[in-house]
Image: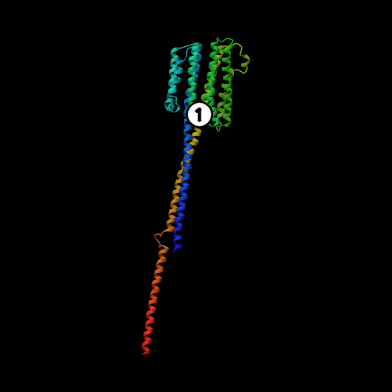
């Protein structure tokens, strides 16, 4: 009887072990899937935020170009194109309404707009205009840095998108600012032979233009070498060449040998305007290419999210099917079915029948023996 009970318990124990293993494996699979999906969702959120930052940097680049142009015009005493500046400022209202809270641009944009309107009201020229508009330009550059930081563009780990970002957010804006201020310094000095502090300031600013242009070129070449976008190099090369030509005209390679020579203010202003235009064109192109790379990355992450969800659903269905198969197998092995009796019940009925037959046979034998004895006793008498 003990052996029969042991055999009856084996399927149940096997079923319990299988269920425990399935539950453990299922739990581990769900944990890994949730972790993978969570990481993918977090990365996708960062990529979306970077795309928002790139979208807002387009109008910011346009505004910065107008501001450095307005600064040089005010320093020379020319008429500042107020409506052009206001139009560039207004172009920021729509993206700020969408991304301003996350990118932390609301109050900064309001401060920038207020300072611009104040500068329009004062209408300063000469050194006063240089001081007033330099503060406004610095505020715009700082805002671009804030957008790059809050959108995580400056923290992008991929080399191709990083160098596009660096050129568009850092190098090219700094190039425009340095070129404009160098031209302003020459204008304020009278446009003659520079000397003393004016000579040093102009030389440093012009050197900054040449240095930024060189770094932009090196960074973009690195980006092209590491990118998976085969069209990146062909689209950037023409605009990069134009920008380098403008920067070389503003800060020629022989500049260090000609620092003490007379500098024509009108020529410097024209060359600075060319640097503004070519730097802005290249910056907009780089931001567009950056948005393309981010969109490709977002599409890849979306495919990963779908694959993880599909794998999780398939794993859940498979676990349910396996558990159902284990349950059906357990009923077949451990309990009586509807169509046929249990083996133990059949054996019990057979044992009872055998014992009843033995008792009947013994009783019949006793009656036969008693009858034989009686007959023998009668014969003897």
Q: Residue 206 lies in what quarter of the image?
A: top right
Q: Position of residue 185 (x, y in %)?
A: 54, 13
Using the image, determine if residue 370 lies above or below residue 175: below
For the point 50% across and 24% down, the residue is 145
Colour pattern: rainbow
Secondary element at image label 1: helix
Q: Nearer the viewer, residue 24 or 231?
A: 24
- Quadrant containing the N terminus is bottom left
For the point 58% across and 31% down, the residue is 225
- Quadrant containing the C terminus is bottom left
Q: Residue 187 lies in what quarter of the image?
A: top right
Q: Position of residue 370 (x, y in %)?
A: 37, 82
Using the image, determine if residue 254 lies above or below residue 8: above
For the point 58% across and 21% down, the residue is 211
Residue placed under numbered mark 1 in the picture = 153
Q: Position of residue 268 (x, y in %)?
A: 56, 14
Residue at the extreme bottom:
381
Drawn side of residue 78 relative to residue 262, left or right = left
For the point 39% across and 69% down, the residue is 352
């Amino acid at each position: 009887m003990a052996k029969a009970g042991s055999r009856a318990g084996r399927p149940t124990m096997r079923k319990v072990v299988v269920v425990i293993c399935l539950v453990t494996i299922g739990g581990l699979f769900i944990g890994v899937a949730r972790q993978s999906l969570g990481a993918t969702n977090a990365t996708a959120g960062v990529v979306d935020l970077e795309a928002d930052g790139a979208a807002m940097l387009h109008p910011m680049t346009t505004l910065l170009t107008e501001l450095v142009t307005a600064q040089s015009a005010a320093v020379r005493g020319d008429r500042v194109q107020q409506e052009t500046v206001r139009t560039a400022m207004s172009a920021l209202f729509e993206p700020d309404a969408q991304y301003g809270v996350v990118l932390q641009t609301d109050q900064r944009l309001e401060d920038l707009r207020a300072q611009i309107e104040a500068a329009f009201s004062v209408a300063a020229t000469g050194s006063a205009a240089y001081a007033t508009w330099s503060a406004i330009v610095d505020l715009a550059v700082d805002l671009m840095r804030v957008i790059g930081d809050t959108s995580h563009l400056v923290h992008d780990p991929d080399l191709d998108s990083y160098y596009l970002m660096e050129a568009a957010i850092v190098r090219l804006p700094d190039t425009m600012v340095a070129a404009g201020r160098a031209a302003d310094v020459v204008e304020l000095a009278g446009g003659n032979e520079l000397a003393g502090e004016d000579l040093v300031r102009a030389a440093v600013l012009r050197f900054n233009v040449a240095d930024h242009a060189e770094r932009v070129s090196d960074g973009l070449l690195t980006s092209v070498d590491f990118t998976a976008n085969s069209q990146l190099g062909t689209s950037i090369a023409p605009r990069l060449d134009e920008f380098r030509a403008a920067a070389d005209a503003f800060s020629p390679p022989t500049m260090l040998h000609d620092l003490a020579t007379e500098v024509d203010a009108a020529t410097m202003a024209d060359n600075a305007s060319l640097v503004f235009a070519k730097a802005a064109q290249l910056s907009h192109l780089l931001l567009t290419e950056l948005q393309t790379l981010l969109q490709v990355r977002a599409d890849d992450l979306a495919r990963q999210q779908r694959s993880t969800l599909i794998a999780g659903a398939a794993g859940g269905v498979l676990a349910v099917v396996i558990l159902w198969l284990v349950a059906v197998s357990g009923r077949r092995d451990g309990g009586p079915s509807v169509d046929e009796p249990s083996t133990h019940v059949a054996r019990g009925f057979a044992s009872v029948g055998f014992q009843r037959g033995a008792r009947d046979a013994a009783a019949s034998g006793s009656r036969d023996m008693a009858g034989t004895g009686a007959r023998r006793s009668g014969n003897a008498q």
